[in-house]
Amino acid sequence: MIQFRGDEQESGELFFWENKDIFPQGIRRCFWIHKVPNESLRGKHAHRKETQVLIAMAGELEVTILFPDGKSKKFLLQNPSEGLLVPPGHWVETRFSSDAVLLGLSDQDFSEDDYIRDMEEFKSLKGRNA
């Protein structure tokens, strides 16, 4: 989990991220997902090279990460002042509340070849670089 620095005042909250250690080449792509039916599951893939930071801009996201060693962990995102770092080679499944808005930040341009969408393929790559 990443905590974003910011400023909270009566007039609103401002948060920002300036971490060049995680994305040394900067943010190459951002995407957002919303209007997902309540409790619907999105993601269901891993990336070979791409690193992402996932942020719940509204609502709640329950993100399940399957690590390359086969272990899994659930994260609850419900505050835009924090984000979840997802390195390459980690399978992601995200459950949305009906009002959730997910913002994704990526260190790579979009490439369909970077996706691992088949769970059996993902399992066969465990312990190796995807």
Image: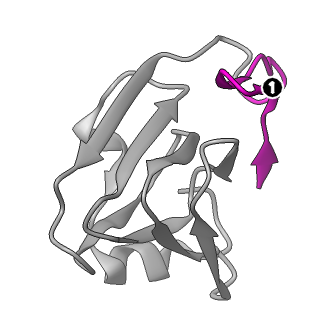
Quarter of the figure that contains the N terminus:
bottom right
Where is residue 77? Give x, y as percent. 58, 62
Task: Look at 56% across and 64% down and name the residue there.
Answer: 90
Kind of residue at badge 1: Gly
Where is residue 39? Give x, y as percent. 27, 81
Front position in the image: 93 or 36: 36
Say which quarter of the image contains residue 42.
bottom left
Check disc 1: other Cα within 10 Å, few if <14, some if 14-19, many if 20+.
few
Q: Which residue is mark 1?
A: 6
Front position in the image: 127 or 2: 2
Where is residue 11? Give x, y as percent. 66, 21
Task: Look at 23% across and 49% down and name the residue there.
Answer: 34
Give the tally of numbered discs.
1
Task: Look at 27% across and 46% down and name the residue there.
Answer: 33
Q: Residue 84, relative to residue 91: is it above or below?
A: above
Q: Residue 129, relative to residue 15: is it above or below?
A: below
On the rendered structure, is 40 left or right of 22?
left
**Magenta range:** 1-22
Front position in the image: 10 or 75: 10
Task: Look at 53% across and 47% down and name the residue there.
Answer: 54
Q: Residue 66, relative to residue 107: is it above or below?
A: below
Say which quarter of the image contains residue 3.
top right
On the rendered structure, is 73 left or right of 2?
left
Mark 1 element type: strand
